[in-house]
Image (cartoon, grey):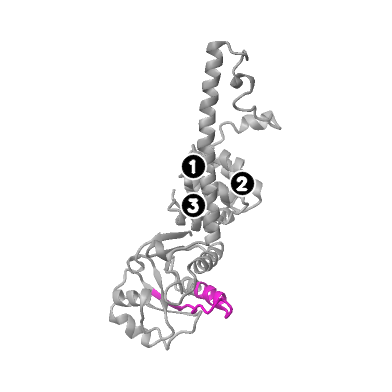
Amino acid sequence: MPLHIVRNDITLMKVDAIVNAANNSLLGGGGVDGCIHRAAGPELLEACKTLGGCETGKAKATKGYRLPCRYVIHTVGPVWRGGWHGEKNLLTSCYRTSLTLAKEMGCESVAFPLISAGVYGYPKDKALKVAVDTIGDFLLREDMTVYLVIFDKAAYQIGGKLFADIQSYIDDRYVQDHTEDRSFRLERQRAAFDMRTGGPEKQPPMAREPLFPKASAPQSLEDALSRLDESFSEMLLRKIDESGLTDAQVYKKANIDRKLFSKIRGNKAYKPSKTTAVAFAVALELSLDQTKGLLEKAGYALSHSSKFDIIIEYFITKGNYNIFEINEALFAFDQSLLGNQG
């Protein structure tokens, strides 16, 4: 755990294994395949000659040779032929068999390129969806750190409709936020004018209608008082208990590794990063108000002046708590990702 989406050159990744998007011969080619062979040196080609090729959707492994990784896992992705020839199943198999092979070899960290999204023509948004879904499903069951390595922004695309919906949501909230700020200022100016001039209304509008409505009374005063000094860690553990989920289920859904969760559990005063706090809110499928309450315990808030915050609000209000899909969108908008950041 967890899944990281990063911009980098995969041949520079210091992990246990990198995955090569190879062709059926395994004897090198263009794109990522060629780069990996050049960086690994001629020993890699000699090793690949002994493997007898590889079927589409399958994977085979060699040593990493001159690369900074221990192993190279070679997998053959499908050529895109319209989507009606089993391409999705084959691409899913590439990720699944590569991850299974990495586990069998004792790897704790693996780096993938976006398989088939280059010369094989698989639409980038669809290739990304398969990658994130398959890796995410694996990580809900297994402990491993997986990197999805994007060489440049042009190689990374989320669905066009999703991107447009999120962009529209962001734009609407920015406009709404600025409009509300302006209205609030005008209201205050009118109120000050009425107070100075003794205008037709003796009280300013703000005095007649409270700015902040009173919160509803708690169901139990004793319960409310007991939670006044509740820390982030205490609230998180209470909500995990209330959810009926295990600790492992929650930290895996939150894209958090076990070591960080242990720190939070063992330290009542632990102050997480904002991305970690939001990740737990997503894993617990909290409502927007509940999310704000959990963030408040960590010293954070959600604001319409932040793209990150608005994107989180978008997914929560849509009822989409898939943290890997949320991270896809955050990466597309150049925002910090949810998960293992302390």
- Earlier-in-chain disc, 3 versus 1: 1
Q: Which residue is under mark 1?
A: 267
Q: Secondary structure at mark 2?
A: loop
Q: Secondary structure at mark 1?
A: loop
- Where, by quadrant of the figure, is residue 6 drawn? bottom left
Residue 182 at x, y percent in the picture: 51, 31
Q: Which residue corresponds to the image point at 29% horizontal and 74% vertical from the top-left?
A: 39
Q: Which mark's residue is nearer the viewer, 1 or 2?
A: 2
The one of 17 and 148 positioned closer to us in this rendering: 148
Looking at the image, residue 250 sits to the left or right of residue 42; the answer is right
Residue 89 colored magenta? yes
- Earlier-in-chain disc, 3 versus 2: 2
Above or below: residue 302 compared with residue 148: above
Residue 116 at x, y percent in the picture: 46, 74
- Earlier-in-chain disc, 1 versus 2: 1
Q: Are marks 3 and 2 in contact (CB under 8 Å)?
A: no
Looking at the image, residue 244 sits to the left or right of residue 295; the answer is right
Q: Secondary structure at mark 3?
A: loop
For mark 1, does the 10 Å Cα neighbourhood hold few (<14), some (14 to 19), or many (20 or more) residues? few
- Where, by quadrant of the figure, is residue 37 drawn? bottom left
Residue type, numbered disc 3:
Leu
Residue type, numbered disc 2:
Leu
Is residue 219 among the parts visible in the rendering?
A: yes
Span highlighted in magenta in the image: 72-97
Disc number for residue 338: 3
Q: CA distance from mark 1 to mark 2?
A: 23 Å
The one of 244 and 301 positioned closer to us in this rendering: 301
For mark 3, does the 10 Å Cα neighbourhood hold few (<14), some (14 to 19), or many (20 or more) residues? many
For mark 2, does the 10 Å Cα neighbourhood hold few (<14), some (14 to 19), or many (20 or more) residues? many
Residue sticking out furthest to the front: 200
Disc number for residue 286: 2
